[in-house]
Amino acid sequence: MSFQHTNLFGGAITVDLPTGFGDVSDIRQVPDTQEVYLDANGFTSIIFDILEWVEDAASDEAALKVHFQDIVDGSGDATNFHEVKQATLAKMPSTPAHTLLAIQTPATPPTPPRNPQPDFTAILLTLVRLAEQKTDITIAINVPHVAEEYALGSVDLENGKPGVMLEAAAMVREKVLASFEVKDWGLFVN
C-alpha cells in the first residue's frame, strides 16, 4: 500500500493517507470541522473530526468512548469492543492519543434498506487530546464488511483473525499515527 502526504484543514494538519483515497469534499459538502476520505476501490472511509474537549470524562479512555458513542448513537447496531489502548503520535509524542477497535453489527435491516448492506463495520477510532486548545480530534477509519467484498469466515477477532480488510485498516492507522502533525495551531482559535 502506498501513501501520500496530505494537507488537512488547509494545511493546518498534515498526515500520510493511502493514495487510493479521495477527498469527499470534491463530490459533496463536508462540515468545516471534518475532513473525509473515501477508498476509490471499496467502502472504507477515514474521517478526521475536530470536536469539543470532553471535560467530564474520568480518563482519556473514557473520553474516547464518549466520542465513539456520539458517532454510533442512534444506529441501533450492536457494539463489541476488541481493543482500547494508549497510542503514540510519532511527530507529537507528548500529545495524549488513544485508540479503540470496535465491531458494529446491524441489529436489524435498516429502513429504508441500504444497498449494499454491510454484514458488520469495523471502526478503528483514534482520539488526539489537545488540552491547551480544549479540543479533541477523532480519526475514524470505518471498514464496512459487505458480502462478496471479503471472505466469509476470514474475520474472527476472538481467535486472532482480523482478515485482509482490517489488516489494511490497521496499517493505515499506524501510518496516520506515524505521520499526523499539527502545523498551524491557529486552527483551534475560536
Image (spheres, rainbow, N blue to C red):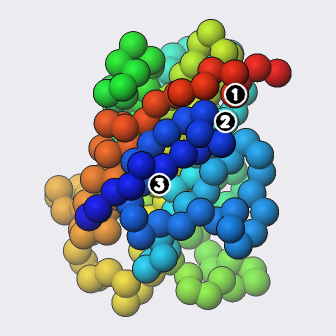
The residue that label 2 is drawn on is 50
**Mark-to-mark CA distance, 3 and 1:** 23 Å
The residue that label 1 is drawn on is 187
Which residue ends up furthest to the top in the rendered image?
132
Between 121 and 19, the one lying in front of the other is 19
Mark in the foreground, 3 or 1: 1
Sooner in the amino-acid sequence: mark 1 or mark 2: 2
Residue 64 visible in the current orientation: no
Left or right: 110 as drawn, with respect to 43: right
Tell me what residue is drawn at x 47 percent, y 54 percent.
Answer: 141
Tags 3 and 1 touching, CB below 8 Å: no
**Mark-to-mark CA distance, 1 and 2:** 10 Å
Mark 2 residue type = Ile
Mark 3 residue type = Ile
Name the spot of residue 33 as percent of width and height, x first.
Answer: 73, 42
Q: Is 84 placed above or below 150 here?
A: above
Sooner in the amino-acid sequence: mark 2 or mark 3: 2
Mark 1 residue type = Leu
**Mark-to-mark CA distance, 2 and 3:** 15 Å
Left or right: 165 as drawn, with respect to 143: left
Quadrant location, the C terminus: top right
Helix, strand or loop status at disc 3 = strand
Tags 1 and 2 touching, CB below 8 Å: yes
Residue 139 visible in the current orientation: yes
Tags 2 and 3 touching, CB below 8 Å: no
Residue 49 found in image quarter:
top right
Within 10 angstroms of label 1, few (less than 14), some, or many (20 or more) residues? some
Sooner in the amino-acid sequence: mark 3 or mark 1: 3
Left or right: 31 as drawn, with respect to 159: right
Helix, strand or loop status at disc 2 = strand
The residue that label 3 is drawn on is 141
Quadrant location, the N terminus: bottom left
